[in-house]
Image (spheres, coloured by chain):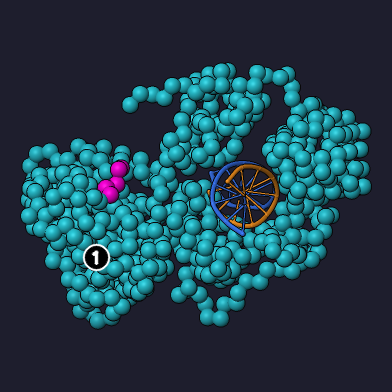
Chain colours: A cyan, B blue, C orange
Amino acid sequence: MSPTDPVSGDVVARAEELRDQIRYHNRRYHELDDPEISDAEYDALVRELQAIEEANPDLVTPDSPTQQVGSAPSELFAAVRHRVPMMSLDNAFSFEELQAWGKRMERYIEGGVEFCCELKIDGVAMSLLYENGRYTRAATRGDGQVGEDVTPNVATISAIPDQLSGDPPAVIEVRGEVYMPLAEFERLNKEQAEKGLRLFVNPRNSGAGSLRQKDASITASRNLSFWAYQVGELEGGPPFTTHWDTLQYLNELGFPINPNIKVLAGLDDVFRYCERWLHDRHTLDYEIDGVVIKVNDLGQRRELGATSKAPRWAIAYKFPPEERTTLLRNIQVSIGRTGKATPFAEMEPVFVGGSTVGMATLHNQDQVRAKDVRPGDTVVVRKAGDVIPEVVGPVLSLRPEGLPEWEFPTECPVCGAPLVRLDGESDTFCTNVDCPAQRVGRIVHFASRGAMDIEGFGDKTVMTFDREGLIEDIAGIYTLDWDRIRQLEGFGDISVANLQTAIEASKSRPLANLLTGLNIRHLGFTNSQVLARAMGSLDRIMSASEEEISAVEGIGPVIAASVHEFFSLDRNRDVIRRLQEAGVNPQGPSAPTLPQTMVGLSVVVTGTLERLSREAAEEAIKARGGKAPGSVSKKTTAVVVGEGPGAAKLNKAQELGVPILDEAAFERLLETGELPEPAAG
DNA sequence: ACACCTCGAGTTCT
DNA sequence: CTCGAGGTGT
């Protein structure tokens, strides 16, 4: 470091490092369509460099990525110069930054400002040129000045008109976002998985990749879609006064305009809009990574003008990152009550989507292979549906040299028995029925809420009892040695009394609950209920033939065989006998018969109701002859919505036009079996 | 044989 | 929530 240089060498080195990283990621993003860090992480790098350069203007070099937008186009496609440059937008990451933007604007214009707010679709920005109403060219944004000619590929997108309707201008350049709908992304990845091909990491990547096909018929097969949001070049069009008007005009010409666009008067409302979509973004069939806020009045826009990099009249409010990268320390398998060996990722804990994530399921061997994640990899992690962590995929460029593929273990990590995967199945199983993991799991399941519902008898209690050799199987719950339990840490007189009461109460649960608790393969609560209703008693089921069981509506050959085999095994008959000796005496499946008002109806409940739990509401539907499935389909009669409904269900209901009921309407439906009149309008 | 709907099983974190 | 697989109707 030179003595005349006031800037510390650390900062110089850091700036250089950041430039290299940014250039590298630019290339991954723009040329290879294979970004390996999230947009937010990329933005963080750029901002750090900008901060350094602002504090030390001497360090700014003309070739610094901060002086450029994007990167140069590749050679695969012809270059296209945009006659009106496609500028990028400044970003805001907080309400404060949004307000600062508003303040800066006040220096340029007078009076009130209206804002046109649009969802920021996470797709590929596109410029579409129409001459005399005909589609003539499509180009990517590229570096903002020069993009790539993707005319034949984009022509296959059905949402993009080939011929404009109405009275089109001589020349119009329409800008918007090409994106892959989530449903299409899932379909595509399912297809990839079936073919044993590598999965696409996210919809944006697959969208960009689909556009860069030399063979446009591949693009066509990908079902991309489009939202228009801006007019670029224009010759001979009508005069507009607001951005909103231009959007309406684009719509009249035949372009899809996102229905969630809103004009709002103040930044407080704008911020509420941002927060609303941050919360609701999972209800959409496409990914968004923020909100774009534009000054609505075009006169005001002209007054505001632009800096060299971005217009002053627009800003992108970016959501906090949903995806983060972290180190995959190891892959282990856990053994469930059925013996199923489920691989899961053990990661360096990372804060993502509102909580710290250290573990995530990998589902099965094929999923690990398809994602190609290996211990030692840096992996991308996100929240699926806002709650469940998910490993998206590895960051290949950060993979240590020679990192070996993960091998599915051949022995159970708990009991050492062989792990076996049968032909044609995706799951691997521990073959030892006495495996402690399975034994404990079965007992926990027996005592769980959908089964015998024994409060206080969760996995911690069961594991303690198992370790002390106090319990062998589910029947052992009713013959516990309470004197010994009272000597255990944490089991005083009160908790023991509570446990005893809970166990006593479980003896008279409905038959379906007992069946659910027995751990019969393929027999969960719903099918147990079907069986219990059809057969009436445990004895009937135990003495029924396989044919009789499979004759029950909804029970096929596989479940029938599983049930029949379970009751034919001596060890299981012995367990049942001991349960009965202990006084377990299930109540008949149907308590007092209610008027069957709901026959033929299928009602989905979501959220918490005030007077009934969701389970009780579903019970009420079934007890009246109706169905209460867990998801909405076109067969669904109605959706009952309580507090905090599931966005997916609500959205699907709206999509399919399924009536949505509140609690009062639901209670009327239960009584009468009739839907309320749809509201007019 | 296939599409579609359901179900079961394992899952994370507060 | 996600995955895989069973059941049913075409």
According to the picture, the residue beneath numbered tag 1 turns out to be A138
Observer-nearest residue: A192 or A89? A192
Observer-nearest residue: A387 or A400? A387
State which quarter of the image contains the C terminus of chain A. top left
Q: Residue at x 79, y 48 (%)?
A: A562
Q: Position of residue A295 (x, y in %)?
A: 17, 46
Q: Is residue A344 above or below residue A503?
A: below
Q: Position of residue A54 (x, y in %)?
A: 21, 64
State which quarter of the image contains the N terminus of chain A. bottom left
Q: Is residue A48 above or below residue A475?
A: below
Q: Main secondary structure of the magenta part?
A: loop
Q: Position of residue A453 (x, y in %)?
A: 73, 34
Residue A519 visible in the current orientation:
no
**Is residue A429 found left or right of A155 in the rendered image?**
right
The chain holding disc 1 is A
In magenta stretch: residue A44 = no
Q: Residue at x 46, y 37 (%)?
A: A653
Q: Which residues are magenta?
A: A256-260
Observer-nearest residue: A588 or A136? A136
Q: Quadrant of residue A205?
A: bottom left
Q: Residue at x 47, y 69 (%)?
A: A395
Q: Quadrant of residue A219?
A: bottom left
Observer-nearest residue: A566 or C6? C6
Question: Callout 1: helix, strand or loop?
Answer: strand
Q: For the residue marked with disc 1, what is the amino acid?
A: Ala
**Is residue A441 found left or right of A146 in the rendered image?**
right
Residue A557 visible in the current orientation:
yes
